[in-house]
Image (tube, grey):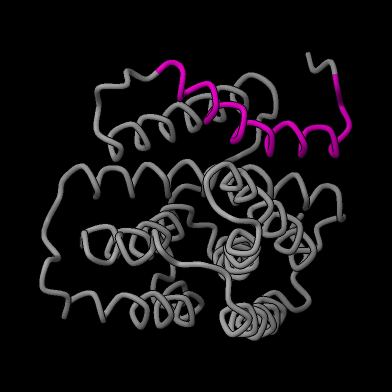
């Protein structure tokens, strides 16, 4: 039996799972492991805690895979597929990109944990809160997905984290719209993983990313991208009420 029955409280608890478990994982996971393995294990812990929380408390149905109308699903996902492909294609021209099993495993676990929480769990909770309005549910889950990146303030400047937050909201809008339209969580997990993995396979790209700082031009680009993704998500979910 649930002690708390209010959907806003459930939403807050699901959102809180991420920062709390990531902090606890830093204490639990042995320090001798590589950074990629530690990150992957941390996200695995997040996923397991969220999964158990759903199993014993929320009882939300997770639409892991939808085998019907695959072409229609891919059509819905096309803007995101184009974006992921465009942002990743340059990596194939980087000299030091190479296959790294730990990076690929970490990317899969990060995508699994984040999509399970923010699309699989939070979107149904927001649907209940907003009386089935898919667009509002996608907006709500995406904003919380963006705010989750504030945990990076422990190592990155506020200016650069603010850009990460805006970008994460934008990407979340695309993924959320796909999930409510396709009922296929594995599709958004795959897209999330593909977006993350390619830059991580290049040490030079990682070094450049570590030196990145806040810039007004980057902020403007992210705001424009946010506006575009709002339009795309709005168009894809227009009139969609999920019972």
Residue appearing at x 48%, y 53% in the figure: 185
124 left or right of 208 in image: right
> Is 55 or 14 nearer to us in this picture?
14
Q: Position of residue 41 (x, y in %)?
A: 36, 30
Residue 201 occupies which quadrant of the picture? bottom left
Q: Position of residue 145 (x, y in %)?
A: 64, 53
> Is 20 or 190 nearer to us in this picture?
20
Q: Is residue 94 above or below residue 49?
A: below
Q: How many marks?
A: 0
Residue appearing at x 48%, y 41% in the figure: 113
Q: Position of residue 70 (x, y in %)?
A: 39, 70
Q: Is residue 60 above or below residue 33?
A: below
Type of secondary structure dominating the magenta stretch = helix
Residue appearing at x 61%, y 43% in the figure: 151
The span shown in magenta is: 4-28
Q: Is residue 111 above or below residue 233?
A: above
Magenta residue check for 190: no
């Amino acid at each position: 039996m649930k002690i708390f029955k209010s959907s806003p409280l459930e939403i807050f608890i699901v959102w809180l799972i991420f920062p709390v478990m990531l902090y606890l994982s830093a204490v639990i996971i042995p320090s001798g492991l590589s950074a990629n393995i530690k990150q992957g294990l941390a996200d695995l812990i997040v996923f397991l805690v969220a999964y158990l929380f759903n199993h014993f408390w929320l009882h939300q149905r997770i639409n892991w895979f939808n085998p019907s109308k695959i072409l229609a699903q891919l059509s819905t996902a096309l803007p995101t597929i184009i974006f992921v492909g465009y942002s990743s294609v340059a990596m194939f021209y980087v000299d030091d990109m190479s296959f790294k099993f730990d990076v690929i495993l970490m990317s899969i676990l990060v995508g699994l944990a984040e999509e399970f929480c923010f699309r699989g769990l939070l979107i149904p909770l927001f649907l209940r809160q907003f009386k089935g309005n898919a667009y509002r549910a996608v907006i709500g889950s995406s904003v919380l997905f963006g705010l989750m990146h504030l945990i990076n303030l422990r190592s990155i400047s506020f200016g650069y984290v603010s850009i990460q937050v805006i970008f994460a909201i934008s990407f979340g809008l695309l993924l959320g719209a796909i999930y409510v339209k396709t009922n296929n969580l594995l599709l958004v997990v795959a897209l999330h993983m593909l977006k993350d993995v390619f830059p991580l396979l290049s040490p030079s790209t990682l070094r450049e990313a570590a030196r990145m700082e806040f810039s007004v031009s980057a902020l403007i680009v992210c705001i424009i991208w946010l506006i575009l993704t709002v339009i795309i998500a709005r168009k894809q979910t227009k009139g969609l009420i999920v019972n």
